[in-house]
Image (spheres, rainbow, N blue to C red):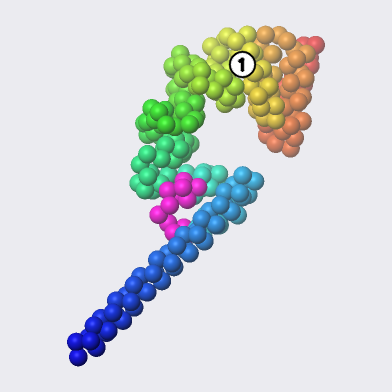
């Protein structure tokens, strides 16, 4: 009788271990499927196929939601679709899962910035820039420069932009921001210098060419301004920016 009980006990334990193993294997399979969908979604994001990306991220979330990287990806996808409240929710969840996930914190700040919740954005960006292990602190510094510029604190904006450029000397967004501050301060020669650097680093950005054209116009370099506006117009063809650039080209042509 004792032998029979021992055998039954062993059989029961093996069954329990088997069920646990099956459950574990099932969870691993779901996580692997979720990772595959997340990676596919990230590939779509890189191609700017945001709807397809979001579809894959949501599919991954159904399989395994407690993935900080996936939650950050979902936030980015909603940001791309200008759904900032949903983006904020996912960035917050990413940080709940991984409090030291600084890229998600910077992204959260960007979402707040889009909603003009400046104080919340500043808190995120200041925390991000203080993370010594964060690989791209020039991003939050540039964002802080933008907020300072928007608030009319030009000297503080210049300080943040220059700090960003100390870390990444050829960062186009920081160069563009710095140039815009110089334009507002009437320091047009300085604006030309930084816009020229920005255009050299990101020659495919029509908005940079538009800014550079404005700077040329303000130092009375009308021929350069005309050519630069025309380039911006060609690059932004059939867009509002392209129309503005074409109109500015026509205006400076009169001064030739």
Q: In this view, does 119 lie to the left or right of 164?
A: left
Snapshot quadrant of residue 8: bottom left
Specify the segment rendered in magenta: 61-73
* Total marks placed: 1
Question: Is residue 34 placed above or below 240 in the rendered structure?
Answer: below
User: Which secondary structure, mark 1?
Assistant: helix
> What quarter of the picture does the C terminus occupy?
top right
Seen as rendered, the residue at the extreme front is 3
Residue at figure coordinates x 25%, y 81% from the top left: 9
In this image, 1 relative to 41: left or right?
left
> Does residue 68 show up magenta in the picture?
yes
The main secondary structure of the magenta stretch is helix
* Position above or below: 58 against 26: above
Q: Which of 254 and 114 is in front in this view?
A: 114
Q: List the residue tagged with mark 1.
A: 194
Task: Report if residue 149 is visible in the image.
Answer: no
Which percent across, then down, holds residue 140?
Answer: 46, 29
Residue positioned 76% across, 18% down in the render: 226
Q: Does residue 220 appear left or right of residue 109 in this picture? A: right
Magenta-span inclusion, residue 13: no
User: In the drawing, does residue 41 fall left or right of residue 7?
Assistant: right
Image x and y of residue 243, in percent: 72, 31
Which residue is drawn at the image coordinates 77% and 24% (left, top)?
230
Residue 47 vertical position relative to residue 249 in the rendered view, above or below: below
Q: Where is residue 248 in the image (x, y as percent from the top left)?
A: 72, 22
Q: Nearer the viewer, residue 40 or 12?
A: 12
């Amino acid at each position: 009788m004792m032998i029979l009980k021992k055998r039954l006990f062993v059989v029961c334990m093996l069954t329990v271990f088997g069920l646990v193993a099956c459950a574990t294997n099932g969870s691993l399979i779901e996580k692997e499927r979720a990772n595959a969908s997340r990676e596919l979604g990230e590939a779509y994001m890189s191609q700017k196929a945001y709807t397809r990306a979001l579809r894959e991220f949501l599919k991954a979330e159904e399989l395994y939601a407690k993935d900080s990287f996936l939650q950050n990806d979902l936030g980015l996808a909603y940001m791309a679709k200008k759904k900032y409240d949903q983006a904020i929710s996912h960035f917050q969840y990413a940080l709940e899962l991984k409090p030291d996930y600084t890229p998600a914190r910077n992204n959260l700040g960007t979402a707040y910035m889009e909603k003009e919740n400046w104080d919340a954005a500043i808190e995120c960006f200041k925390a991000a820039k203080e993370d010594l292990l964060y690989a791209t602190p020039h991003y939050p510094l540039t964002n802080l420069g933008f907020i300072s510029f928007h608030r009319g604190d030009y000297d503080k904006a210049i300080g943040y932009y220059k700090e960003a450029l100390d870390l990444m000397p050829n960062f186009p967004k920081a160069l563009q921001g710095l140039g815009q501050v110089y334009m507002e301060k009437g320091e047009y020669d300085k604006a030309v210098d930084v816009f020229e650097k920005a255009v050299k680093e990101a020659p495919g950005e029509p908005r940079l060419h538009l800014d550079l054209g404005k700077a040329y116009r303000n130092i009375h370099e009308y021929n350069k301004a005309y050519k630069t506006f025309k380039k911006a117009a060609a690059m932004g063809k059939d867009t509002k920016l392209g129309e503005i650039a074409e109109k500015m080209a026509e205006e400076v042509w009169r001064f030739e």
